[in-house]
Each structure stands twice: as C-alpha cells, then as structure tokens.
Image (cartoon, rainbow, N blue to C red):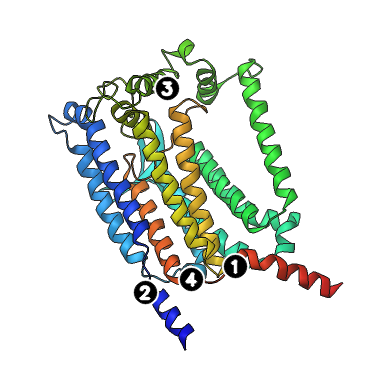
C-alpha cells in the first residue's frame, strides 16, 4: 500500500529546478538578443530596435505553451508513432524544395507557412531522437553489438543527415543528427567496439580532409575548405572567411574578466556579422566578461545535470533513451557553438540553445524540455536505471543458452 502511495506521489512530481534553469536561460537570452541586436535592428527597421526581441519573445511564448502541454503528454505515446514521426521529419526536409521553401543568406533551409519561417532541421533533431529511442529499445544488447544491428540503428540517421547536407546544405545540423545517433547507440550498448571503430574511421576521414585542405592537395576548396584555411590562420583571411571569427575573438578579448557592461559592446555595432545568432556568446563575453561566459556555461552544466537525473532514474528503456538523445543534442550544440566562437573548430552555423536568435530553435528546444519534464514525472527515484539493469540480464540469458 505504501508503494502505491509513493508511486501516486511520484506521478505528481514536477522538476521545478529544471523549469527555473530553463526560464532563466530563456530570459537571459531575450535580454542578450535585445542588447546584441537593437542597433542593427534600428538601422534595418526604421528605428525599431525591438524587432528581433519581439520576434524571439513570440517564439518563446509559443515554446513555453508547447512545453507546458507536452509535459502532461505521456512520453510513451511517441513510441507508438515513432515511424510516422521519422517519415514526417523526412517530408519536412523535402518541403524546402517546394514553393514554400525560403532562401535566406544564400541557403535554402526554411519553408514559409502561416506567416512564419520554419527550419525543418530543428524538428528533425527531435524526430530522430524519438525514432531512434523506439528502434534501439526494441533490440537486445547482442543485436545492437552486431554489424547488422549497428547498420539498422545508424542508417535512418545517416539518411536524414545526408538529406540535411545535400538538400539544405546544412552540414552543422547533419553533424548533430549523426552525433545524436552515435551516442545513443554507444550509451545504450556498453562495450560496442564496432561503433568505436566506425567513429575512429570517421575522425580519420575528417583529419585527412583537413590536412588535404591545409596542404593544398585539393583542386577546388569550396567555401568549407576556405573556412578551414581561415580557421588555421584567421588573420591571413581577414578580408574573407576569417573576418567573422576575428571580430568574435576581438569581442571576447576586449571584454576581459568582468566585461564592458551590459549594452556596451562595440562588436555588435555592425562589426560582428550575425551577432544575435551564432556569435552571441562573443557579445556575452564582451559585455559580461569571461565571468559572464563561465556563468552561462555553468548554467548549461546544471541544465544537463537535471536532464541526466531524469534519465538515470527512469526505469523504462524508451524514456531513458529519449533523455540520452536530448542530453546529447543540447551538449553537442553548446560545445560546437562555443568552439566556433572561440575559433577552436572551423566556423559553422550552430545557434546556442535558448539564447541565440531563432524561432524554430527555441520552440523545439522547449518542447524537448517538456518531454524531459514528463519523463521526470514518471521516473522512480528508488530504482536503478533500465539501461544498467539490462546488461546483467542479457549476460544471464546468454549463459543459460550456452
């Protein structure tokens, strides 16, 4: 009887600490978007410095409503529609090729509907998490360790990644989708040596390509090759692909430890392109200093810690894997964004979750938070995780068969 009461109480559980972190990041993002974009917005919109802030605030409100609704939808429902979700994601990518498709800054990555532009890549990231969680949870550990199982798991993600790259020319989102699939496989299948071999081969291929670009072994570089050269020596390419990252580094360096003060950035005055988007972390460091930058990183660490807790105590494998996918998605996106801004890796367009300007990004990140909150409601904090229990059981089955 006591157990039933505990479970009933657990169903009413709500992770207020996670909600607080999400709201804080969202509010901080709105402040920084206004601070970063007000000057450029005033020039482009007849003195209206609130254009980007209003657009992001509308998206944030939509996202918060969606997060609240999703937090009450049983997450197991997504497992029943996993295949439909996957093929729906594929169709959304193809929509950019229709008359609804929209080209912005030379890239056709959006489609326009009901007066709003939607980036399908943001929907696809969530879709692949929900689909792969259902797919992996239906395979036992032995199957997941085989080449056939690895192929079954990674191929759907590879198809979507290829479509994002070749149809929307969005390499960064393609990398994130591939990263989500790989880590979901590895975390759900401890000791999967074949997966590590594939990862090593992929890294070797990337390193070989970078070396070929740097040493001039390729006939035609393309804009990605030029970005790699700019990454190795941004000052030598200050008039081209190295300009943005140089301005970003100037902003970070000029902020010092404590920053110039909120609203006092110089780089946002037309010097740093896309300051309110992918490069907003540079403005944060310029205005709030390295201290502000570290504070933002610590907030994301706290966010990931709360997400991890929901997964650790979820005794159902599907929910556990959904948490893994969302955790990996946010972690990869934050790491790549900061690495690009600090010129640790070549420049690629990745927004900072909750903070960078972008309606589709903030809406679907908030939906992911709603799913995490629902899984946390169902988590049993007295039990061990489903993924940890499965391995011994699988080993016992193999021993009994032998």
- SS for callout 3: helix
Cα–Cα gap, marks 2 and 3: 47 Å
In the rendered structure, the answer to whether residue 191 lies left or right of residue 15 reads: right
Query: Which residue: 41% across, 80% down?
Result: 8
Q: Residue extending furthest top? A: 236
Residue under pointer 2: 12
Cα–Cα gap, marks 4 and 2: 17 Å
Q: Are marks 1 and 4 in contact (CB under 8 Å)?
A: no
Using the rendered image of the protein, determine whether residue 105 is visible from the camera's viewpoint.
no
Q: Are marks 4 and 2 in contact (CB under 8 Å)?
A: no
Q: Are marks 4 and 3 in contact (CB under 8 Å)?
A: no
Identify the mark nearer the N-term, 1 or 4.
Answer: 4
Q: Would you call the spot at circle 4 few (<14 residues within 10 Å), some (14-19), or many (20 or more)?
A: some
Task: Place residue 391 in its image quadrant.
Answer: bottom right
Identify the mark nearer the N-term, 2 or 1.
Answer: 2
Cα–Cα gap, marks 4 and 3: 43 Å
Residue under pointer 1: 386
Q: For the residues carrying marks 4 and 2, which lies nearer the camera in this image?
A: 2
Q: For the residues carrying marks 3 and 1, which lies nearer the camera in this image?
A: 1
Cα–Cα gap, marks 3 and 1: 44 Å
Where's the C terminus, which quadrant? bottom right
Depth check, front residue: 8 or 321: 8
Identify the mark nearer the N-term, 3 or 1.
Answer: 3
Using the rendered image of the protein, determine whether residue 215 is visible from the camera's viewpoint.
yes
Task: Place residue 283 in its image quadrant.
Answer: top left
Residue under pointer 4: 76
Residue 245: give its label.
3
Cα–Cα gap, marks 1 and 4: 15 Å
In the image, residue 23 lies at what x, y percent?
30, 52
Depth check, front residue: 237 or 84: 237
In the rendered structure, the answer to whether residue 194 lies left or right of residue 26 reads: right
């Amino acid at each position: 009887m006591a157990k039933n009461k505990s479970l009933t109480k657990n169903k009413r559980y709500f992770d207020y600490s996670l909600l607080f972190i999400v709201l804080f990041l969202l509010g901080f993002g709105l402040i920084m978007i206004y601070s970063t974009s007000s000057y450029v917005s005033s020039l482009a919109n007849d003195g209206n410095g609130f254009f980007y802030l209003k657009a992001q605030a509308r998206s944030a409100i939509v996202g918060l409503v969606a997060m609240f609704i999703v937090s009450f939808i049983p997450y197991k429902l997504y497992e029943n529609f996993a295949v439909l979700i996957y093929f729906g994601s594929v169709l959304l990518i193809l929509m950019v090729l229709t008359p609804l498709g929209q080209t912005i800054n030379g890239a056709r990555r959006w489609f326009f509907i009901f007066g709003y532009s939607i980036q399908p890549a943001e929907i696809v990231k969530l879709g692949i998490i929900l689909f792969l969680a259902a797919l992996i949870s239906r395979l036992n550990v032995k199957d997941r360790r085989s080449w056939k199982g690895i192929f079954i798991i990674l191929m759907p993600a590879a198809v979507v990644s290829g479509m994002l790259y070749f149809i929307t020319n969005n390499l960064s989102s393609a990398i994130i989708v591939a990263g989500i699939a790989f880590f979901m496989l590895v975390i759900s299948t401890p000791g999967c040596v074949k997966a590590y071999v594939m990862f090593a081969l992929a890294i070797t291929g990337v390193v070989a390509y970078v070396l070929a670009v740097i040493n001039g072994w390729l006939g035609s570089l393309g804009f990605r090759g030029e970005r790699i050269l700019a990454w190795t020596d941004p000052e030598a390419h200050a008039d081209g692909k190295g300009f943005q990252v140089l301005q970003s580094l100037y902003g970070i360096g000029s902020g010092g430890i404590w920053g110039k003060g909120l609203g006092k950035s110089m780089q946002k005055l037309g010097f740093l392109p896309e300051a309110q988007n992918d490069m907003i972390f540079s403005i944060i460091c310029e205005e709030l200093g390295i201290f502000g930058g570290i504070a933002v990183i610590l907030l994301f660490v706290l966010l990931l810690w709360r997400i991890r807790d929901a997964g650790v105590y979820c005794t159902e494998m599907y929910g556990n894997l959904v948490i893994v996918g969302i955790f990996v998605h946010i972690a990869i996106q934050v790491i790549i964004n900061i690495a690009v801004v600090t010129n640790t890796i070549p420049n690629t367009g990745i927004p900072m979750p909750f903070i960078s300007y972008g309606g589709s990004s903030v809406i679907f990140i908030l939906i992911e938070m709603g799913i995490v909150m629902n899984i946390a409601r169902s988590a049993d904090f007295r039990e061990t995780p489903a993924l940890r229990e499965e391995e011994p059981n699988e080993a016992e089955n193999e021993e009994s068969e032998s």
